[in-house]
């Protein structure tokens, strides 16, 4: 028997970088969490501790800050610049994956006018991008996490399998709530207006959630993915992970009260987790995208 080193990667995770663009008319905040993972010719460091092929994770962190000095732009662009830099400048690095989360800040209003330099963290979901580059090809996956949405009606769940452990009652009118975690794969890494693509995909997810009369969260998931693909021709696959944020009707009978679908217990655990991928039948192979 011999023992060998398997797949490996290393990098600086979760570099928090905030850039302020000090435009005269209004400042802009870009608040990022950047994780770099490099892989390549790294056998020596694992087997003997020889580090001559290792670009320190500390250097990777510094690179994130230095690149931010030149401006960030869209997170997909920033990720592409970083990933290409690590692979193209270091012969021992064969592949770079850069994951970026962008925390949303909304400009405050002061006496009805947009504030010049004051912001509030908003709960409209965290924008994400994962860029992978292997020296020849780049893959870009964009997304959103923690976009919490709720329909107070327009959702049913009935006709499901029943066995001796089933206690769930069928319902023709329930609350449907979830925290959308979605990622979507772009056809290519060039010539995309990333900001417009993100805004369009996000809008499509929300429109489909609101407009779908839901017989299951699974049906809503498919409708959301399908809407993104029909609205954004540059996107070829959407992956969704949707926690079912259960709202249980509270029994008010002990207090002599009815409860006509008005008072709920918002449970946080356990939750149903509905996950799936929706893709175009002509989608190119995913390669190293995910
Ligand atoms: O939309 C739903 N899908 C399920 O699979 C499921 N299972 C469950 O208990 N409630 C729900 N709701």
Image: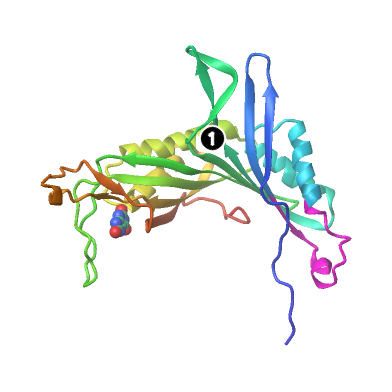
Q: Seen from this angle, which residue lies furthest bottom?
A: 1
Residue at (68, 18) in percent of width and height: 23
Quadrant holding the C terminus: bottom right
- Locate residue 209: give its quadrant: top left
Residue 107 seen from this side: yes
In the image, taking residue 35 as reference, residue 164 lies left or right, namely: left
Colour setting: rainbow
Dot 1: within a 10 Å radius of its alpha carbon, few (fewer than 14), some, or many (20 or more) residues? some
Residue at (30, 40) in percent of width and height: 151
Q: Helix or strand or loop: what does disc 1 sit on? A: helix
In the image, taking residue 250 as reference, residue 179 lies left or right, namely: right
**Foreground of the two, 278 or 285:** 278
Q: In this view, does 142 lie above or below 107?
A: below
- Locate residue 54: give its quadrant: bottom right
Magenta span has 79? no
Q: Give the range drawn in magenta.
A: 36-57
Residue 139 seen from this side: no
Residue at (79, 56) in percent of width and height: 93
Residue at (19, 52) in percent of width and height: 171
| Number of marks in picture | 1
Indicate the position of residue 101 as horizontal and vertical percent values: 60, 43
Indicate the position of residue 49 as horizontal and vertical percent values: 85, 68
Magenta span has 38? yes
**Foreground of the two, 51 or 161:** 51
Q: Name the residue under label 1.
A: 197
Quadrant holding the N terminus: bottom right
Quadrant location, ligand no. 1: bottom left
Q: Seen from this angle, which residue lies furthest left?
A: 256
In the image, taking residue 54 as reference, residue 210 lies left or right, namely: left
Indicate the position of residue 7 as horizontal and vertical percent values: 69, 67
Indicate the position of residue 31 as horizontal and vertical percent values: 63, 35
Q: In this view, does 10 lie above or below 100?
A: below
């Amino acid at each position: 028997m011999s023992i060998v080193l398997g797949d490996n990667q290393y990098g600086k995770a979760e570099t928090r970088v905030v850039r302020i663009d000090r435009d005269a008319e209004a400042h802009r905040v870009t608040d990022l969490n950047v994780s770099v993972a490099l892989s390549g010719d790294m056998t020596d460091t694992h087997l003997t501790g020889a580090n001559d092929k290792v670009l320190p994770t500390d250097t990777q962190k510094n690179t994130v800050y230095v690149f931010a000095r030149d401006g960030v732009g869209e997170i997909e662009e920033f990720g592409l610049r970083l990933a290409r830099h690590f692979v193209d400048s270091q012969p021992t690095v064969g592949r770079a994956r850069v994951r970026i989360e962008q925390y949303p800040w909304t400009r405050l209003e002061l006496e009805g006018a947009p504030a010049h330099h004051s912001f509030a963290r908003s709960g409209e979901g965290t924008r994400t991008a994962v860029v992978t580059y292997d020296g020849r090809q780049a893959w870009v996956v964009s997304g959103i996490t923690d976009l919490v949405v709720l329909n107070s009606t327009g959702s049913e769940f009935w006709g499901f399998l029943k066995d001796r452990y089933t206690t769930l009652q069928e319902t023709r009118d329930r609350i449907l709530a979830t925290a959308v975690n979605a990622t979507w794969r772009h056809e290519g890494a060039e010539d995309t207006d990333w900001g417009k693509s993100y805004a369009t995909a996000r809008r499509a997810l929300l429109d489909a959630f609101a407009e779908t009369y839901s017989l299951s969260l699974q049906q809503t998931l498919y409708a959301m993915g399908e809407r993104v693909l029909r609205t954004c021709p540059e996107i070829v696959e959407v992956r969704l992970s949707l926690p079912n944020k259960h709202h249980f009707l509270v029994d008010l009978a002990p207090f002599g009260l009815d409860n006509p679908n008005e008072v709920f217990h918002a449970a946080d655990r356990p939750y149903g987790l509905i996950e799936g991928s929706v893709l175009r039948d002509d989608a190119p192979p995913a390669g190293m995208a995910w």
